[in-house]
Amino acid sequence: MRMAKNELLSALSSLPNIASNYFENIPEESLDVRRLPTAWTIREHLYHIAGIQAMLLARLDLMYREPQPVIVPYFPDKETEKLSQWTSASEALARYRELRAAQLAVFEKSTDEVFSRPARHAEYQDYSMGVLLHHMVFHEYWHLYRIEELWLTKDEYLTELL
């Protein structure tokens, strides 16, 4: 898979700032409103983004160190990051920033060979640091978009697709 490595790393590095700036505008009372029975709250989306960063860093470290890394699939419905592991949104955002800096350090010290080296992952036919980089960027933008929908969309326009 051909990668736009520099552009994706730039996007990845900017996402904590984008999220933090956006959260400064969301009123505290909006964070825990469950607008649809099947939709996460804004806080749950944020805690998920912050909560998976340690797991992603561990994956990156493994792929950096191991010549034939095997990645264990992650199923968020079985995890606890949506629960109260943070005392506030600002604490979650601070941890997100901290772990992102560590992730970027691993990406930056990785040679092109390490970056594109195949890893085995039960869910994916192709997996590498490059694929993970794509996934991280797109996944976080997806959650940020969901947060925006939950915050700004009028009730009559929300759907079960959230």
Image (tube, rainbow, N blue to C red):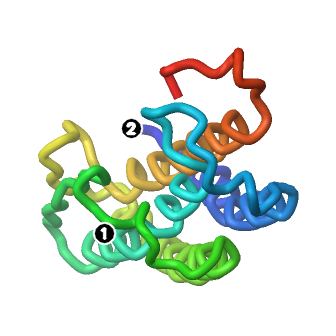
Secondary structure beneath dot 2 equals loop
Look at 25% across and 41% down and name the residue there. Answer: 126
Q: Give the number of the disc on residue 59.
A: 1
Residue 81 falls in which quadrant of the image?
bottom left
Residue 38 appears anywhere in the view: yes
90 or 33: nearer the viewer: 33
Crowd class of label 1 (few under 14; some 14 to 19; many from 20; radius 10 Å): some
Q: Looking at the figure, which quarter contains the N terminus?
A: top left
Residue 4 appears anywhere in the view: no
Instruction: Return the residue at label 2.
Output: 1
**Taking 58 as reference, is 91 left or right?**
right
Q: Relative to 63, does residue 7 appear above or below in the rendering?
A: above
Q: Where in the figure is residue 48, as x and y percent of width and height?
A: 47, 59
Dots 2, 1 in contact, CB < 8 A:
no
**Taking 110 as reference, is 102 left or right?**
right
Secondary structure beneath dot 1 equals helix
Q: What's the amino acid at mark 1?
A: Arg
The single residue placed furthest to the right in the displayed view is 25
Q: Give the number of the disc on residue 160.
A: none
Q: What's the amino acid at mark 2?
A: Met
Disc nearest the viewer among 2 and 1: 1
Look at 52% across and 64% down and name the residue there. Answer: 47
The disc, 2 or 1, on the residue closer to the chain's N-terminal end is 2
Q: Where in the figure is residue 65, as x and y percent of width and height?
A: 25, 80
Look at 60% across and 36% down and name the residue there. Answer: 35
Q: Relative to 96, does residue 124 appear above or below in the rendering?
A: above
Crowd class of label 2 (few under 14; some 14 to 19; many from 20; radius 10 Å): few
Q: Where in the figure is residue 31, as x and y percent of width and height?
A: 67, 56
**Taking 116 as reference, is 150 left or right?**
right
